[in-house]
Amino acid sequence: MWQFTLEDVPALSKAAMLLGAGGGGGTGTELVEPILRRALREHGPVEVMDPGELPPESLAVPVGFVGSGTVMHEKPYEGSEIVRAIRGVEGHTGVTVQAVVGVAMTGIMAVVPVIAAAQLGLPLVDADGTGRGVTKLSQTTLTLAGIDLTPAAFTADKGSNLLVDGVNSADAESVIRLSMPAMGGWAGMAWRPLSMDEIAKGMLVGSYSTAIEMGRLLEERDRDGLAERYGARTLFEGKVVEVPRRHLGQFPTGTVVVEHAEQPDRALRIEMQNEYLVALEDGRIVACVPDLICVLDQETGTCLTAERVRYGLWVEVLAIPCHPQWRSAAGLELLGPRAFGYDMDYVPLEGTAG
């Protein structure tokens, strides 16, 4: 067990943006960070616990955010949405939760569970269901474990509530995506409370501990530390010379073209669909999903989301190996290149040229 304090906020925010791999509601992370600080000041530090440190009968509610981080700039997070969603799930299921756990370690999704834990005075389970940014709510290790997350409650800023039950996680996502316009573009969410056994079986344990360490390494711009601890590798450094964007289906898609800083005859092409998914040079894969591709502003070290990357920026393209679970056959079926429509096999980052 350890305590999440005000001193940990910057590290979590930086890691959440990095692990978002361009997505995860990253553009709204700076909007919820002040709410996290306020919650910690008002309620004190949050106890972060491994599933094995809680009584086996304890139930933790998975919480997060769904919708557009960009819309959140126009309709800011008020601060009570997640707690109201949790109360909705408790009321529907007839249980009382003893802890909070994150659905995905990315952008806003990584921050709001800590806010909810602080507001409710509950421990935060040191785990999540992705370890990286994902496009769909059904793309979690809980899906790999055959654990459904419904019933689920979704709450918007103006008090509108939606309860989804009787369907699996994938169908629940379809319902909530269709409901997003009526709810104002985004919503806080709380899923079916999970036992400690389900969390140990179906989630990635140690997510918040890892994120805090990653965030501190980012703050120090310690690339050697990121490489040694997490296998991170700088793929490319240069200038963004082209960002053609397309809007196909639910998520913004497009391409980022980066011209090499010292060798202008070299260019890296990054394909994105909400997250950065495939990086190619001369038609050769240098990194691809489910490994993480991250674009950082060279001057500030800030992680750039797919929404904010633009022509003229000087960037560093960093890649990080994903959690081993995503490299299984079932994991690649859910989160590999073909899951996003790319006709290519997964190439592990360690197997590409340095």
Image: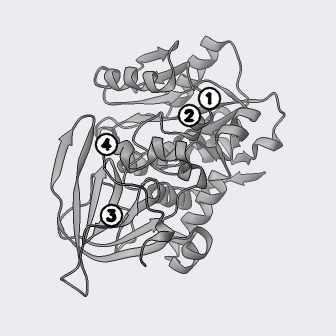
Question: Could you tell whether 249 is left or right of 144 in the image?
Answer: left
Instruction: Identify the residue position indicated by label 1 in the image.
Output: 147
Q: Secondary structure at mark 2?
A: helix
Q: Which residue is mark 2?
A: 143
Whether the residues at callouts 4 and 2 have beta carbons within 8 Å, the answer is no
The answer to the question of whether label 3 and label 4 lie on touching residues, with beta carbons closer than 8 A, is no
Q: Quadrant of residue 318?
A: bottom left
Residue type at mark 2 is Thr
Residue type marked 3 = Ala
Q: How many marks?
A: 4
Of callouts 2 and 3, the N-terminal one? 2
User: Is 171 on the left-hand or right-hand side of 72?
Assistant: right
Q: Of marks 1 and 4, which one's residue comes earlier in the chain?
A: 4
Q: Position of residue 343 (x, y in %)?
A: 31, 50
Q: Amino acid at mark 4?
A: His
Q: Residues within 10 Å of mark 1 (few under 14, many from 20)?
A: some
Tell me the CA gap for discs 3 and 4: 29 Å
State which quadrant residue 151 falls in. Answer: top right
Marks 1 and 2, how far apart in space? 6 Å
Label 4, on which residue? 73
Mark closest to the chain's N terminus, 3 or 4? 4
Report helix, strand or loop for mark 3. strand
Where does label 3 land, which residue? 279
Q: Residue at x 75, y 46 (%)?
A: 50
Q: Nearer the viewer, mark 1 or mark 4?
A: 1
Residue type at mark 1: give it: Ile
Instruction: Kindly check if marks 1 and 2 are in contact, taking CB atoms under 8 A apart as contact.
Output: yes
Foreground: disc 4 or disc 2: 2
Answer with left or right where residue 116 lies relative to residue 293: right
Distance between the Cα atoms at labels 3 and 1?
A: 32 Å
